[in-house]
Image: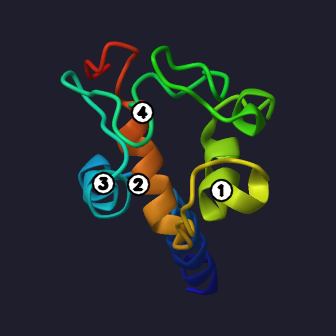
Amino acid sequence: MALTKYWLAATLVIASGGAGLAQDTGAGEGVFKRMCFPCHDAGAAAKVKLGPPLNGLEGRQAGTIPGFNYSEANKKSGIKWTDESFAEYIKNPMQRMPGTRMAFAGVRDEKDIVNLWAFLKQFDDSGNKR
């Protein structure tokens, strides 16, 4: 009986830990529309707005999307977009990249960050879903 309780408790802990890491592209699209879309675009018809299109970010060096005039701070940041670098940056872009022209307070909610990144990284350089 005691062994069964421990097994059940361990199973629940493992299962709940995985749920915290789940990525929801639909929820990420909602975050994008609410917080990013006024300045950025993503997808097959993405175009330059106040900010660059956000297609093909995963693995890309910051400040390299063709057709956008980046700040020197962005071009020289050395950031390569990954799950970790995106999460760190998007929490407070102006603090993470002093001198950026991206005047955005940031995304604080961890779940929103994970979901937003899931939404963005699904697009290749052309804006097609991978």
Q: Residue at x 32, y 13 (%)?
A: 126
Mark 1 is surrounded, within 10 Å at the Cα level, by few (under 14), some (14 to 19) or many (20 or more) other residues, namely: many
Of the residues under marks 3 and 4, which one precedes in the sequence?
A: 3
Which badge, 1 or 3, is on the more N-terminal residue? 3
Quarter-of-image position of residue 129: top left
Q: Which residue is mark 2?
A: 115
Q: Nearer the viewer, residue 59 or 67?
A: 67
Neighbourhood count class around disc 3 (C-alpha, 10 Å): few under 14, some 14–19, many 20 upward: few
Is 59 situated above or below 11?
above
Residue located at (57% from left, 60% from top): 103
Q: Which residue is mark 3?
A: 38
What kind of residue is marked 3?
Answer: Pro
Alpha carbons under labels 1 and 2: distance apart: 18 Å
Q: For the residue marked with disc 4, what is the amino acid? A: Leu
Picture quarter with the C terminus = top left
Q: CA distance from mark 1 to mark 3?
A: 16 Å
Look at mark 4 in the image and give the residue it sits on. 54
